[in-house]
Image (cartoon, rainbow, N blue to C red):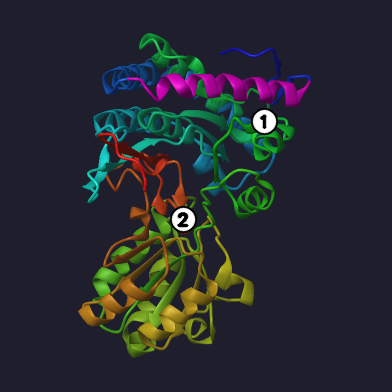
Amino acid sequence: MTYGCQIVTTPLKTVDNCGDIASLMGDIGRRARAAAQNVAIASARRKNTALAAMAAALRHAVPDILAANSEDLAEARSSGATPAFIDRLQLDARRVEAMAQGVEVVRGLADPVGTVIDSWTRPNGLRIERVRVPLGVIGVIYESRPNVTADAGALALKAGNAVILRGGSESFRSSRAIHRALAAGLAEAGLSEDAISLVPTRDRAAVGEMLRGLGGTLDVLVPRGGKGLVARVQAEARVPVFAHLDGNCHVYVDGAAKLDMAKTILLNAKMRRTGVCGAAETLLVDRACANTHLAPLTTMLLDAGCEVRGDPDVRKTDARVKAAGEADWSTEYLDAIIAARVVDGVEGAIDHIETHGSHHTDAIITEDQVAAETFLSRVDSAIVLHNASTQFADGGEFGFGAEIGIATGRLHARGPVGVEQLTTFKYRIHGSGQIRP
């Protein structure tokens, strides 16, 4: 759907004039609500047809998407964006193909809508079923990563929802180009283009309207971005929120860890992509193996171009290590920086994570099964790993095809938010004339 916004493009800036933001957003909400009612009853076959068409449209639109992305990148670089920020924003043919493949994986998932989760018969003969149903209209507010446009659109559609996407200002052009491909796929399958709406303005007032619930048309919000964005959404939203908090992820190297495995996992967890939420931000090393493991791990990170901020024990291993301040233990760097300290065994690691962690993703490296089970059972994070990189914190790696975010709360959804997490349930009761005495 095209809205009445005047878009004026200059070489490095897009200026949008949408007039009355409240009216604009109210119209988007009403259209999404109408579309949600139709998508909720759409057959799995029709939704899958749309998803297949969306994947094909993304591949066809590669030149347009990359051209739009190059403009976003130019603007970001001119404003002094960090290399990690640029990495989150940047698209290439491989990343667009990954988006298309993600849509196809979502297409191949079982349709959750209408699934009978449980059923039972009461003594009075009533048969009760708990059945999956769509959430309704989902609002997604995200920053920098334009691929979220495709991921969120595909997942919401598969789960029978309509979605309103508000991408970051920095990825405005890229998200618009991706959205055009998604809309083409919807149209080809005969579904309303309003099922996947993209807010057509960079005016921040649009976010405020979404937080207020768009006149009752919005059922749930999913924020995906920095701590500031998520904190604002949690504080101001008048609708339920799937919180995606910062990923202050830890790698704990236990005294029974194999050094070679620890080096391989840690390097991947920190440096594979420093700007993703599953990147390790803190290294914890058991005092029991500090003499043999700490220096090799620290030197490896430094030689790979990672800044290390350490406690006194870590600073002794290499002159290049900087002193860690108290704030470092709770910081999500999203950059080639890591905090490191020595702890007293698995208990010390658990205490540190509980004090400074964000309940996102944390890993233990050890050959001691008792230590591993202790860590996995007591670390209260959405994702805990044993002998594996924290960068597996990703819906695609879980087999979900994609994700809208990693939920770190405890209600309804936790961990990667995929198709099942974008549904709720209702009860269907079958009787034969029963009345309550």
* Residue visible at 39% across and 10% down in the picture: 190
Q: Position of residue 348 (x, y in %)?
A: 43, 85
Specify whether 234 is left or right of 312. right
Tell me where residue 403 sits by quadrant.
Answer: top left
Circle 1: element type: helix
- Of the pair 102 and 259, the residue shown nearer to us: 102
Q: Establish if 167 lies above or below 280.
A: above
* Residue visible at 54% across and 37% down in the picture: 219
Q: Establish if 412 lies above or below 324.
A: above
Q: Position of residue 396 (x, y in %)?
A: 32, 43
* Residue visible at 74% across and 26% down in the picture: 22
Tell me where residue 270 sits by quadrant.
Answer: bottom left
Tell me if label 2 and label 1 are in contact, CB under 8 Å. no
Specify whether 202 is left or right of 342. right
Specify whether 102 is left or right of 69. left
- Of the pair 85 and 356, the residue shown nearer to us: 356
**How many badges with numbers are in the image?**
2
Q: Which mark, residue 215?
A: 1
Residue 26 painted magenta: yes
Residue 90 makes an appearance in the image: yes
Residue 377 painted magenta: no
Q: Which residue is mark 2?
A: 411
For the magenta stretch, what is the residue range? 20-42
- Quadrant where the image shows the N terminus: top right
Q: Amino acid at mark 2?
A: Leu
Q: Position of residue 306 (x, y in %)?
A: 48, 63
